[in-house]
Image: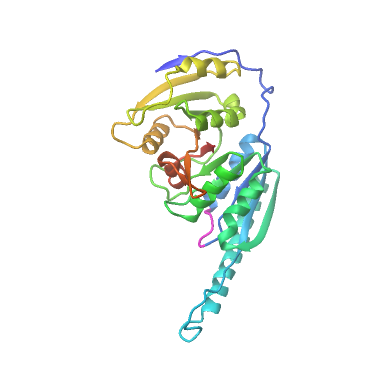
Amino acid sequence: MSIVGALPRPPDGETIMAFKDLLLQISCYPERSHDHVIENAVAFAAALKAELTALTFEYEMSVPHSPMGGMVLDVGGMVAAETQKSVANANEALKVFNAAALKAGVPHSQMLERTASGLVDQAVANHARLRDLTLIPAGGPGDFQQFIAEKVIFESGRPVVMLPQPETRGPAKRPVQTLDCIAIAWDFSRPAARAIADAMPLLKQAKVVRVITVTNEKTLSTNRSLSDLKRHLGLHGIEFFDDEEDAAGRTIGDTLLQYSENFGLDLLVMGAYGHSRFRDFFLGGATTTMTANPTLPVFLSH
């Protein structure tokens, strides 16, 4: 491990903060986002001195056509009950959000919209286009939250921060209090470069920045050295620790999560990967891990 030098930091108070307008997507169906996640989102906004808007939905459930009609099951009644469940969950989540924001002194607002359940991901992406950053609670593999994250990452043009759920695998993470220790997952790729550019305001305010390169998992797409990254970040007044982590048979996602635990990171910055197939995006392996099972806030950009 080596530390890479940089130009002096700007004096205290002179760091320019670009993240002033944050969006929090709150899940309301089939279960609502956990109170802990909502409170962590508020703490994240407080750390950035940003305004936070909560967005959630009342789901419009459609009644499926059945040749049996209502002879056996009251399908219409079941759909109405599920719709009401989404309404109750949304209102309860917004109460938690408002209480947390008021307690933290975070400027805030809320949006409760009604939309078809299959259109929620696109609705969130549309709102995210006019926000600096969108906070999304993680779900699990195949969970609808993962589809929402995918849509926002690839179609909003804005970065996303995935927030871990309390039941997420791995060690329990402390509540978000600061963003002092940040690591960049670096592989010389276009998404990684985009993530660094988007996260620059956070990197400038961090007390410790690390750059992690995972080895023995895939072939890096360049022979350029970290000296190029040193020069670039150094011109922004950012110094960093340079780390290499051997995957040793693990996936990149698991390697990065273990690294994050070892160094007590507050935030991991990485590029989001996906490929287009029949005009749909499918997430890469590491991105899938970070949208489904993060153990710390993960900043993703494409």
Magenta run includes residue 94: no
- Mark yes or no: residue 93 visible: yes
Q: Position of residue 256 (x, y in %)?
A: 40, 34
Which quadrant does the C terminus fall into?
top right
Of helix, strand and loop, which mostly describes the magenta segment?
loop
Residue drawn at point x = 59 percent, y = 28 percent: 197
Total tally of numbered discs in the picture: 0
Q: Is residue 227 above or below residue 165?
A: above
Quarter of the image where one finds residue 21: top right
Residue drawn at point x = 61 percent, y = 54 percent: 96
Residue drawn at point x = 46 percent, y = 49 percent: 166
Q: Is residue 86 above or below residue 40?
A: below
Given the current orientation, which residue lies at the most extreme bottom position? 71
Observer-nearest of 122 and 293: 122
Q: Position of residue 207 (x, y in %)?
A: 55, 24
Q: Is residue 218 left or right of residue 148?
A: left
| Visual colour scheme | rainbow
Which quadrant does the N terminus fall into?
top left
Q: Position of residue 243 (x, y in %)?
A: 41, 22
- Mark yes or no: residue 135 visible: no
Q: Position of residue 235 (x, y in %)?
A: 60, 16
Which residues lie in the magenta part?
Answer: 30-34
Given the current orientation, which residue lies at the most extreme front position? 278
Quarter of the image where one finds residue 257: top left
